Image (spheres, rainbow, N blue to C red):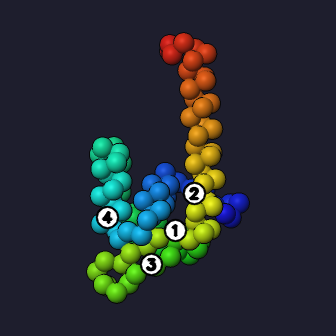
């Protein structure tokens, strides 16, 4: 992972969806369904992010036989970036939970 490259929440969701090859509509649907509608990534944002991640070599075009449904998947580099990001996010959650437990959950 380039040290200057920040993984946004939207990138994280898309990368997580691409642990298996998926086309754009399947990515958007999976994210919306698994987040119970809390996260919705529109097509313009998603394809902008996909283009960026292709340039970073985090994902690759898995199947382009149907021009209307290009399928993407994570590269080895993308898998490594995702694993590092999962670790970072776990640490953030642990910190937040510990902080809330110290305060007794009170404001």
Residue 58 vertical placement versus 107 (above, below): below
The residue labelled by disc 1 is 74
Q: Is residue 34 left or right of residue 9?
A: left
Q: Earlier in the sequence, mark 1 or mark 3?
A: 3
| Residue 106 or residue 30, whichever sits in front | 30
Q: Residues within 10 Å of mark 1 (few under 14, many from 20)?
A: many
Q: Is residue 14 left or right of residue 24?
A: right
The residue labelled by disc 3 is 62
Q: Quadrant of residue 13?
A: bottom left
Q: The N terminus is located in which quarter?
A: bottom right
Residue 7 vertical placement versus 52 (above, below): above
The residue labelled by disc 4 is 26
What whole-number distance in Å separates the C-alpha atoms at marks 2 and 4? 19 Å
Q: Earlier in the sequence, mark 2 or mark 4?
A: 4
What whole-number distance in Å separates the C-alpha atoms at marks 2 and 3? 18 Å
Is residue 107 visible to us here?
yes
The residue labelled by disc 2 is 82
Q: Is residue 46 left or right of residue 95?
A: left
Q: Earlier in the sequence, mark 4 or mark 1?
A: 4
Q: Residues within 10 Å of mark 2 (few under 14, many from 20)?
A: many
Q: Residues within 10 Å of mark 3 (few under 14, many from 20)?
A: some
Q: Residue at x 38, y 68 (%)?
A: 22
Residue 38 place in picture, x, y as percent: 33, 43
What whole-number distance in Å separates the C-alpha atoms at marks 1 and 2? 9 Å
Residue 17 place in picture, x, y as percent: 42, 59
Q: Are marks 1 and 2 in contact (CB under 8 Å)?
A: yes
What whole-number distance in Å separates the C-alpha atoms at marks 4 and 3? 14 Å
Q: Earlier in the sequence, mark 4 or mark 3?
A: 4
| Residue 20 or residue 4, whichever sits in front | 20
């Amino acid at each position: 992972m380039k040290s200057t490259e920040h993984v946004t929440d939207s990138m994280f969701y898309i990368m997580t969806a691409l642990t298996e090859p998926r086309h754009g509509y399947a990515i958007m649907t999976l994210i919306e369904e698994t987040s119970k509608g809390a996260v919705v990534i529109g097509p313009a944002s998603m394809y902008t992010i996909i283009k960026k991640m292709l340039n970073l070599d985090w994902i690759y075009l898995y199947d382009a036989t149907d021009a209307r449904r290009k399928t993407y998947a994570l590269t080895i580099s993308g898998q490594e970036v995702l694993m590092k990001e999962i670790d970072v996010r776990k640490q953030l959650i642990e910190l937040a939970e510990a902080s809330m437990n110290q305060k007794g959950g009170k404001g």
